[in-house]
Amino acid sequence: MATPSRTLPKSNFHQSNISSSVGTTAPPTAPLDAAVPQRLIEIPYQEEEDDFTYPDHVIPSPSYQGMENLVIVCCHAIFHPDADSSSFPLNSPHLEENWHLAPFQRSNPKTGRPGEHETFVAHVLAGYDALTTGSFAKSTLLVLSGGATKRSISSLSEARSYYHAALAHELAQGHQGGGRAHKLFAKGRVLLEEHATDSFQNLLFSVLLFRQTTGRYPKQIRIITHAFKSKRFLDLHAPAIKLPPDRVQVQGIDPVMSRLEFDETVQGEEKYGYVPWLQDPLGTGDLLAGKRKQRGWDGSAAKELGDGLEESVKELLIGKVPEQLPWQTKSSIEQATPDAMSC
């Protein structure tokens, strides 16, 4: 079963070092023993271990009892600062230089267009908001979906880098220990899907990860992505894998665009995003399969993705659409296997 690592980035324990490096002074603390203010209380020195991780017995295994809904954040780039570095909190996800961006995602000083990394931060924060606000918050799992698509410059997956971006955002806000980003991750409420190389795989692989984690398929699925990609998900991807239309929603958050940029973006999505998937719903043809390969997709991963799942799902993973898929039945949504209730 795929589960997130619960290692706390070392940077979260180095706030005092960071404070001194930027010229700040830690505030005075209250006396340890208010009744005897002059008493010196000795605390044995313990040398810090560089690679410390919490033992399994310290952090309770996450429980997925009552988890029914899935929120997917589709990832599009890589936030690259090293989360294990003591200087990590100084690397803001709001700075373009901290992202590996494609040319079309970068800022344009001539037109005033900001870099698209700001939109990516908005996507991941919206995902976290879904776990902390609203009527379905307590019954929802968040999946950050995106593989290692830029292997020539980084082995980091898009999904893991988005988690690091959320962590860096919390640290920049003054939440030592990583705030809600780390807290929800450690509780198993945030999962990393690290195989997807396109929007179809974002949806399918996230649904399968939810099933492998909870033992059931999600009741409701919310996809957080660009608004201009809504038709691609609702009209093409969801029907291609026979997801009931009343169970799939899109929360669209677009980049900041001028009128001209908006028109060009919509036209580009229609030509290069929508039509290719209309002609090749599963992405197995030369064009879309070729893009997957360029982004690092390895077809052998299909076996891992289908591990322990229904035979019909395994067929879908190799590009065949069976007559019936398990998420079309009510029982697969309501039932959960005992072994998958916690991990």
Image: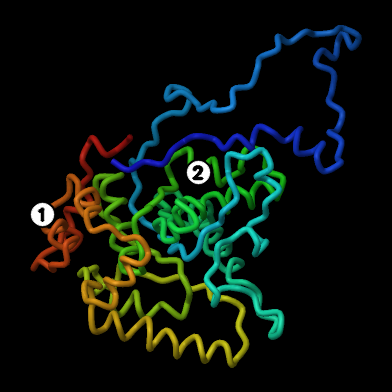
Among the two numbered marks 2 and 1 on one chain, the one whose residue lies closer to the N terminus: 2
| Amino acid bearing label 2 | Leu
Q: Position of residue 142 (x, y in %)?
A: 43, 53
**Residue at horizontal 41%, vertical 56%?**
148
Classed neighbour count for the residue bearing mark 1: other residues with Cα under 10 Å, few (<14), some (14–19), many (≥20): some
Q: Give the quarter of the image for residue 292.
A: bottom left
Residue at horizontal 85%, vertical 33%?
Answer: 27
Residues 135 and 146: in front is: 146
* Quarter occupied by the N terminus: top left
Q: Indicate which disc residue 222 carries.
A: none
Secondary structure beneath label 2:
helix
Residue at image location 37% in from the left, 53% down from the top: 193
Q: Residue at x 38, y 88 (%)?
A: 271
Q: Position of residue 332 (x, y in %)?
A: 18, 53
184 left or right, relative to 196: right
- In this view, the residue farthest toward the front is 152
Please tell me whether residue 259 is drawn above or below residue 292 in the rendered image.
below
Q: Position of residue 300 (x, y in %)?
A: 22, 54
The answer to whether one can see residue 333 in this image is no
Could you say which disc has been placed on residue 184 in the image?
2
Please say if the residues under marks 2 and 1 sit with CB atoms less than 8 Å apart.
Answer: no
- Res. 168 visible in picture: yes
Q: Amino acid at mark 1?
A: Glu
Q: How far across and down, in percent of the image, does residue 309 sit?
A: 17, 49
Q: Say if 336 sits above or below 203 in the image.
A: above
Question: Residue 311 — which label?
Answer: 1
